[in-house]
Amino acid sequence: MESSNRIYFYQGSIQGREVETILHDIEKISAQYNVHSALWKKVYIVVVELISNIERHATVQPEAKNSYIQIEQQGRYIFVEAGNVVQNKEVNALQTRIEKVHKQANYDHLKQYYLDKVVSADISVKGGAGLGIITMAKICRNAFTYNIRPLKGSLSFFTIRIKLE
Amino acid sequence: MYQQEATEKTPAIQFDWSKGLLVMEGNSRPEDVQSFYLPFLNYVEKEIQTSSVSIEKFTASFTFGYFNSASAKFIFDIFALLKRFHDKFEKLTIEWCYEKGDIDMKEAGEDFSEMVDLPFQYVMIDVR
């Protein structure tokens, strides 16, 4: 197995100003690593989606400071990982959304599912169209894993790891 | 005429019904996607509905560096609007421009074309 090289890590609250800082940092470091521009663009788009999700859903304070974004290079692959605290009442809906994407049998099914969702999407009160997970899944050809770990009280910790090539 | 300058998070928009032209160019990840796209969509709909000017050729050109998933819903709505009023123009041309090597962006155009069932012209641009 090829060794993994962590090329970016941010941990803390991800809201407003921090979002811009993260995206600027990622743009800056792209020049330092030998990553094809098309692959780096996938990384950028996936990070945009991940931090939008965190911004919308990880609103629990003070635990929001545990949110993180990490980018690793492993050979020709880039792994983008994000984690954030979610409220338990949101876990079922999140898991259902992810599993619907995960169970698509192949890329053609995933693509059709994406097309149908874009056509029928409604914008939520939080400003999302419910398309973030499926957009990322389409970019990585469904090569992602996730975990939801219960924390104390009414909270859980959600992590997602996306493999890009 | 509807005109909006590009920002780091939002694309430039130029819509001129009398000239048969719509140009969108830039990135799209508005903080409030509805506030950005809805006024534009409402303007276009009203302009086309109420205009007495007959448009022979309407060209819509889209050049995105990237757009987020919430923007995709509204970009689709723009195409759906053009499709709804396609009888108002004799010829509708949709140009989908993508950076050389950016196959994902070209595929995004193909997805929209399939969703809305309109033909797109794909234009590869060489960005240096």
Image (tube, coloured by chain):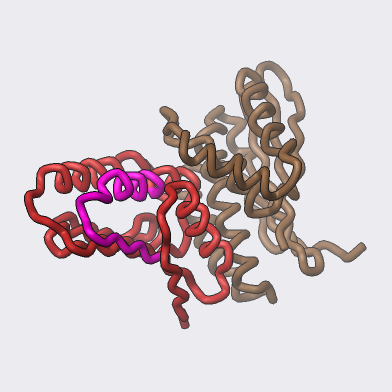
Chain colours: A brown, B red
Q: Position of residue B66 (x, y in %)?
A: 47, 59
- Tell which of B108 and A54 is nearer to you: B108
Image coords of residue A49 (percent x, y):
55, 47
* B45 inside magenta stretch: no
Is B12 in front, or is A90? Answer: B12
Residue at 56% in and 42% down: A132
Task: Please state, as top left, top right, bottom left or bottom right, where the N terminus of chain B lies in the image.
Answer: bottom left
Instruction: Give the residue at x 53% y 30%.
Output: A59
Give the prevailing secondary structure in the magenta stretch. helix
What range of the chain is rendered magenta?
Answer: B75-95
Residue B85: give x, y in percent of width and height: 25, 46
**Which quarter of the figure has residue A38?**
bottom right
Residue nearest the observer in this picture, A15 or A102? A102
Residue sitting at the far left: B52
Left or right: where A65 falls relative to B111: right
* Residue in the image at 41% along x and 54% along y: B118
Quick check: A101 above or below B105? above
Image quarter of residue A60: top right
As displayed, is residue B88 above or below residue A73? above
Residue B5 appears in the rendering: no
- Answer left or right for B26 relative to A131: left
